[in-house]
Image (tube, rainbow, N blue to C red):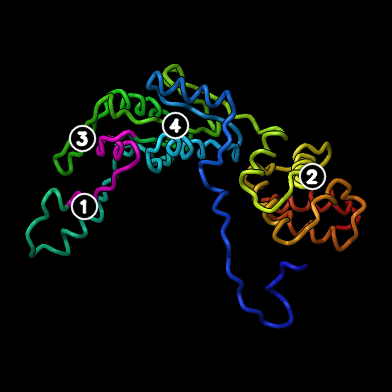
């Protein structure tokens, strides 16, 4: 296999890695018409946009695209956790670090509030947007992971557009002219409060169809013809929708992009995917080696081996 450089009989120099910068470039994001409409509604009403959809459908990437489109810099991100509290939306205070610093520096003068802020306060997405008093995109990622009260706390915070930091005696606020664009994502791991859902703009991102996937790959994968990209997508959909080979974790758009990049890098003839059952044993082995990009569990990798070689090959 031509892409192998590790594991050969003789040592070889490590090749230079060339990154595909188009893969993560927000200008190449392909929102659907429905998603575009949802963004416009959220902006017009000043309400948060709540996105659901299976992992890999582009929920978090939308924040980058909206920020790029309106030239608002990089989005400010808050990653919700099971232990997140209302104050975490704005800032995190390193109380332990502050205590240890005080114990180790008893002979010196106490820190000023500005010094405490610099050393032990870290502003989170929403707090940073309010503090900056600039229009920003704020991404609150996986809000369904947070405690049940947090979604309602988010709405209260967005309504007030202010917060205080009692540890340093400071308060920050902004106004509607600098209201952040809030995009929240959920993997639907648990139900969100009804009161919260009534006050957000909601949109579910369906998994892209073949035509949309082709547009995405044409934007993000260099050096592959549209015809070969079509063959890659057809085989990808065959894996996702196979009647008997049921994967525990279906590969998503991100895996498809990496897979198409890998097949191009190793020089695999993508046109042969249309008749993969008639490929030679060597071609099947090369194709199977690429499935490690698509499968994320031992069972799923075994299922893809069965798809390619049949169960007798195990």
Residues at marks 1 and 4, CA–CA distance in whole angstroms: 28 Å
Dot 2 crowding, Cα within 10 Å, few <14, some 14–19, many 20+: many
Give the quadrant of residue 206: top right
CA distance separating discs 1 and 3: 15 Å
Query: Which mark lies nearer to you, 1 or 4?
Result: 4
Q: Which mark is residue 118?
A: 1
Crowding at dot 1, Cα within 10 Å, few <14 / some 14-19 / many 20+, comes out as few
Q: For the magenta stretch, what is the residue range? A: 116-135
Mark earlier in primary sequence (3, 4): 3
- Image coordinates of residue 90 in percent, x first then y, are 30, 38
Q: Quadrant of the C terminus?
A: bottom right
Q: Where residue 264 appears, x then y in whole percent?
A: 71, 56
Q: Are marks 1 and 4 in contact (CB under 8 Å)?
A: no
Q: Residue at label 2?
A: 231
The answer to if 157 sits in the magenta stretch is: no
Q: Is residue 37 above or below residue 124?
A: above
- How many discs mark residues in the rendered view? 4
Are the residues tagged 3 and 4 within 8 Å (C-beta)? no
The residue that disc 3 covers is 172
Using the numbered discs, state the Cα–Cα distance from disc 3 to disc 4 in whole angstroms.
21 Å
Q: Is residue 219 left or right of residue 185?
A: right
Point out the tag, 2 or 3, that comes first from the N-terminus. Answer: 3
Task: Please tell me which residue is depicted at 85% across the width and 45% down the height of the picture.
Answer: 274
Closest to the camera, between mark 2 and mark 3, is 2
Q: Find residue 245 and report its horizontal and vertical position in percent.
A: 81, 42
Relative to 137, is 298 above or below? below
Question: Tag 3's secondary structure?
Answer: strand
* Helix, strand or loop for disc 2: helix
Question: In this view of the protein, can residue 297 be seen by the observer?
Answer: no
Crowdedness of circle 3 by 10 Å Cα count: few (<14), some, many (20+)?
Answer: some
Residue 183 marker: 4
């Amino acid at each position: 296999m031509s892409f192998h450089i590790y594991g050969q009989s003789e040592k070889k120099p490590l090749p230079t890695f060339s990154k595909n910068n188009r893969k993560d470039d927000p200008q190449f994001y392909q929102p659907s018409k429905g998603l575009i409409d949802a963004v416009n509604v959220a902006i017009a009403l000043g309400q948060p946009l709540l996105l659901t959809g299976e992992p890999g459908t582009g929920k978090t990437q939308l924040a980058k695209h909206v920020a790029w489109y309106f030239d608002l810099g990089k989005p400010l991100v808050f990653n919700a956790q099971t232990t997140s509290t209302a104050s975490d939306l704005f800032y995190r205070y390193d109380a332990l670090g502050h205590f240890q610093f005080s114990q180790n520096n008893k002979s010196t003068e106490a820190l000023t509030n500005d010094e405490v802020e610099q050393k032990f306060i870290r502003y989170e997405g929403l707090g940073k947007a309010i503090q900056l008093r600039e229009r920003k995109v704020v991404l609150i990622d996986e809000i369904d992971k947070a405690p049940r009260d947090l979604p309602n706390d988010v709405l209260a915070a967005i309504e007030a557009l202010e917060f205080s930091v009692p540890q340093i005696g400071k308060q920050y606020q902004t106004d509607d002219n600098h209201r952040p664009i809030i995009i929240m994502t959920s993997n639907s791991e648990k139900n969100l409060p009804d009161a919260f859902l009534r006050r957000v703009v909601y949109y579910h991102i369906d998994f892209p169809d073949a035509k949309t996937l082709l547009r995405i790959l044409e934007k993000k994968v260099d050096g592959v013809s549209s015809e070969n990209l079509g063959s890659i997508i057809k085989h990808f959909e065959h894996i996702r929708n196979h009647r008997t080979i049921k994967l525990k974790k279906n590969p998503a758009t991100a895996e498809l992009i990496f897979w198409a990049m890998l097949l191009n890098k190793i020089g695999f003839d993508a046109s042969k995917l249309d008749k993969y059952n008639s490929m030679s044993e060597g071609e099947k082995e090369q194709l199977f080696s690429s499935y490690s990009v698509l499968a994320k569990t031992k069972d799923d990798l075994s299922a893809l081996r069965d798809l390619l070689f049949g169960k007798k090959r195990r």
